[in-house]
Amino acid sequence: MIVQTTCTSFKAEVAQALHNFTRTTGDVFKLALYTSTANLGADTAVYTSQGEASGTNYTPGGAVLTNITPLSSGTTGYWSFDDLTFSNVTLTCSGALIYNTTGSRAVCVLNFGSTITKTASNLVISFPPMGASDSLLRIT
């Protein structure tokens, strides 16, 4: 089961300064794709290959995300990533895990709401716009 959530371990790791989301000088984050057989949720603490998607032009471990430097508005801190394109892939997936490549620390789980099948075409992961009420990651 893939449960969309911010990983519990990530919440403590932010306070421990184990993640740096600054665009050009921060840590490297990746997005890995998963099939419906994956078991991902709040207790996911690190990247796992169990249930990971496989297919043509998809590399295990996923693809590198481009960080958007964190901002704040009012009492909310927020940040996200640029949209990500998996080019010319043939695969099936139902969700994703975003993780920090330093220590393979899990950040959040995404559930796509349905199974996506691509055959020799692009798969675009679109993130919500940056903003205190819209960004993928927020601290309020």
Image: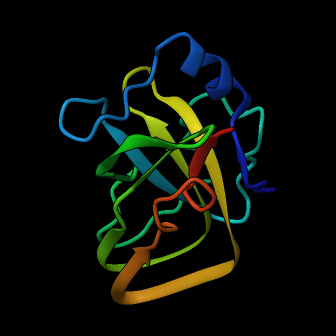
Q: Residue at x 46, y 60 (%)?
A: 130
Considering every residue shown, the one lying at the far left of the view is: 24
Tell me if I can see residue 50 in this picture: no
Foreground residue among 108 and 103: 108
- Whether 137 is drawn above or below 100: the answer is below
Q: In the figure, is residue 80 to the left or right of 9? A: left
Q: Position of residue 131 (x, y in %)?
A: 51, 58
Q: In the figure, is residue 81 to the left or right of 136? A: left
Quarter residue 28 falls in? top left
- Whether 73 is drawn above or below 120: the answer is above
Q: Residue at x 63, y 58 (%)?
A: 133
Tell me if I can see residue 83 in this picture: yes
Q: Position of residue 98 (x, y in %)?
A: 51, 46
Q: Position of residue 136 (x, y in %)?
A: 56, 55
Quadrant of the rendering where the C terminus is positioned: top right
Q: Position of residue 119 (x, y in %)?
A: 41, 89
